[in-house]
Amino acid sequence: MKSSIKRAGALTATVCLLALSGAALTACATHEVDFQGEGEGFVGPGAPVQAVLETPSVGTAGQDAADDPAVWASASPVTVMGKTTPGFIAGTDKKSGLYIYGFDGQILQFMPEGLLNNVDLTEGLSVGGRPQVVLGASDRTPGKTGISLYLFDPAGTGGNGVRPWGAIATDVIEPYGFCFARRGAEIHAILVGHEGELRQFVLSVDAAGQPVSREVRRAEIGTISEGCAADEATDALYIAEENVGLWRYGLNPASGAARTLVQPIAKDILVADAEGLTTLTDGDKRYLIGSSQGDSTFPVWRIDGTAPEYKGRFKIVDGVVDGVTGTDGLAAASGVVGPFPEGLVVIQDDVNDVGTQNFKYVDWRDIRRALGL
């Protein structure tokens, strides 16, 4: 999301008055803190990393359109619209629909699905006896606001592609952030509203092969929020409140609104707007990567311990393709991801050098090396 208040003059951010002691919170006092914003395209300090390739520009020209990606890697090749690929990247054009890209950055499929904002995907559900990849996207299209759902059949052939499956209805007026999470055998769909609403659902399949959802948590984050990512191993749900900071909630919906402020908005660490979030597993280590949109950098925390540990920041600089500024969303996948042997991070680029906004592919090994992880 591009905030109308973040880059010119002083940015007013609301932050919680608390000692960063790790204690869970259900509410907090607030006060106004001035943050001195920078100009459009400003890039703050961070370890330099280069992207290795990029997608074509999204189809909606001249607008803030490309938003959020998701990455899926298959153990064996699959067919998407007649093309063989070891997986795909889904990416939203929030003015018009959903793109499906190959690991070479080329477009495999486009679905004119309306005003989709954030997208995520997961495995673990079968429809008609066939295991499926499930995609979900926060949908702001008038008359269908909620979570739009899609399926991909890894065993499909020929014209096989991502197809609409249904939706999760919600009372959120403007759906914004979205992520899937696994809790044991359950698949949870988590929606973040523009005004800071938090809604969590358990997703299942009925006898007719249609999606069934059950709301299991509703809470209020406070102010405009978007990015979310889950870590099942530590029962954690991370949410970025754009002008406040990074929160850690319990992934267990019974934890309600209790939360801990991991990182408040702060110069050279996390600059408003705090945007996308993604997790990545690297051997026995797990990391959370965020988007510090206000200075076009990416803070990284190690999250497999008792509390998140800040490890530094990186930035995407010019190289084979141009650098990255003003990122909305990002996503990562671990292990072998097509031609990326140890993981891939895909990042939305707000100001592309040629054409309109697009997505950049970054080899995880380059990030790990740059930060000494």
Image: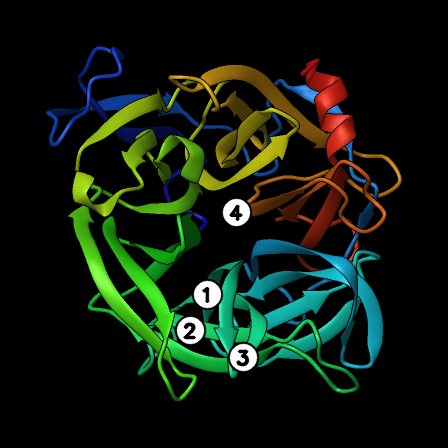
- Where's residue 273, x and y in %? 42, 37
Residue type for callout 1: Ala
- The quarter of the picture where the C terminus appears is top right
Q: Nearer the viewer, mark 1 or mark 3?
A: 3
Residue placed under numbered mark 4 in the picture: 328
Return the disc, 2 or 3, that comes first in the chain's sequence.
3
- Where's residue 328, x and y in %? 52, 47
Query: Do labels 3 and 4 touch, CB within 8 Å?
Result: no
Return the disc, 3 or 4, that comes first in the chain's sequence.
3
Is residue 59 toward the left or the right of residue 169 in the image?
right
Residue type for callout 4: Asp
Residue 246: quadrant of the picture = top left
Is residue 252 toward the left or the right of residue 270 in the image?
left
* Residue occupying image coordinates x 17% and y 48%: 219
- Where's residue 220, x and y in %? 17, 46
Q: Residues within 10 Å of mark 1 (few under 14, many from 20)?
A: many
Counting every numbered tag in the picture gives 4
Query: Do labels 2 and 1 touch, CB within 8 Å?
Result: yes
Image position of 334 with respect to 168: above or below: above
Return the disc, 2 or 1, that comes first in the chain's sequence.
1
Image position of 310 with respect to 248: above or below: above
Return the disc, 4 or 1, that comes first in the chain's sequence.
1
Residue placed under numbered mark 2 in the picture: 148
- Give the label on residue 137, or none: 1
Image position of 111 with respect to 304: above or below: below
Q: Nearer the viewer, mark 4 or mark 2?
A: 2
Q: Residues within 10 Å of mark 2 (few under 14, many from 20)?
A: many
Residue placed under numbered mark 3 in the picture: 129
